[in-house]
Image (tube, helix red, strand yellow):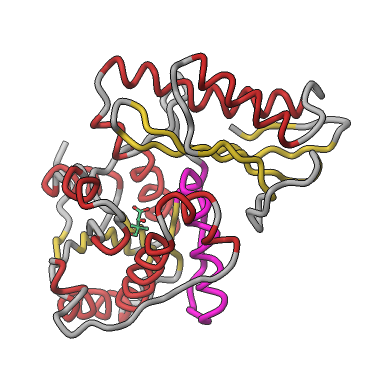
Amino acid sequence: MTERIVETIRTVPDLRDAIAARRADGATVGFVPTMGALHRGHCALIKRAASEHDVVVVSIFVNPSQFNQAADLEHYPRDENGDVKAAAAAGATICFAPSAEEIYPADFASSVRVCGPLTETLEGQERGLGHFDGMATVVTILLNIVQPNVAYFGAKDAQQALVVRRFVTDLQIPVEIVTAETVRDQDGLALSSRNARLSPAGREQALAISAALQASANAISDGSAASPDGAAAAGVERLRAAGITPEYLAITDSSTLEPARELSGTLLIACAATVDGVRLIDNLTVIANREAATANC
Ligand code: PAF
């Protein structure tokens, strides 16, 4: 089988030219922003984009401004050659792998901020407001450069996807946002670039995160939890049994991320925990209506 070749572009003018040439032929453009270390979750997004568009741009850029800890940025897995091959095999047309200076020139002085509970809770509370400011700013820059018809994000970063939808709407950025289902290993572990840093024992322990989300979802659907706190406690108990103290395990409204007041409507069960020195996040969406709750795992 011949290996697909993708073009790796490093500068904004070159990327704009390459996309403009294809648009002139009537091509539509799908965009998958990544920080590299591509796994099957990213590849599923790229495959979906390739099934819906003539041109698929994948950005590979470890965005320094969304990391709140220098060590986390330093240890973030990087493998550009492997990423370009994986993106090509999944159907990408162009990989955009800019330097930090290309995105943030020396005189860069702007920021995009989404205010309110969407950014202040969960990840915003744990990682600081700068995390979502950094993410929103770089995604805005990338959307302005690529100007895709559709941009694809994974549901594992549910809060990120909601924040992106918010600023795309507020700032009238002409792009459709697709949030695609979380891809999991067979044993339930949500795929993440950070999983590469887990030892075999750490990976085994990390399975408690998806199990805890499921325990909370079950407590909602089988009626054993009488309240959001009760449902959260079921998940926390599962984590503690595995020796994990979560940063949070929260039951929230799935669109506002406000704490759920009762077990009804569409709820997001979201969890963050550090396992084996690696910070992991995961979530489940549950439709809770006291009669028949269903979990979308
Ligand atoms: O989800 C990610 O990998 C990053 O937050 C993103 C969207 C590529 C922005 O840096």
Residue 255 falls left or right of residue 204: right
- Percent x, y of residue 113: 45, 73
Location of residue 50 in the rendering, given as x and y in whole percent from the top left corner: 37, 54
* Of residues 88 and 130, the one drawn nearer to the viewer in this rendering: 130
Q: Is residue 274 above or below residue 20?
A: above
Q: Give the range drawn in magenta.
A: 154-181
Front-most of residues 185 and 263: 263
Q: Which residue is drawn at 51% across and 73% down?
A: 168
Q: In which quarter of the image is the C terminus?
A: top right
Eyeballing the image, is 264 above or below 207? Answer: below
Residue 36 lies in the magenta stretch: no
Q: In this view, does 241 lie above or below 46?
A: above
Question: Which residue is located at x 16 percent, y 79 percent?
Answer: 105
Ligand 1 quarter of the rendering: bottom left
Q: Quadrant of residue 24?
A: bottom left
How many numbered marks does the figure carry? 0
Taking the spot 88% from the left edge, 31% from the top edge, the residue there is: 291
Residue furthest right as drawn = 291
Q: Position of residue 197 (x, y in %)?
A: 23, 31
Q: Position of residue 56 (x, y in %)?
A: 32, 60
Foreground residue among 128 and 165: 128
Residue 167 part of the magenta segment:
yes
Q: Which residue is rendered at x = 43% and y = 32% of the image?
A: 190
Q: In which quarter of the image is the N terminus?
A: top left
Asked if residue 208 lies left or right of residue 142, the reply is: right
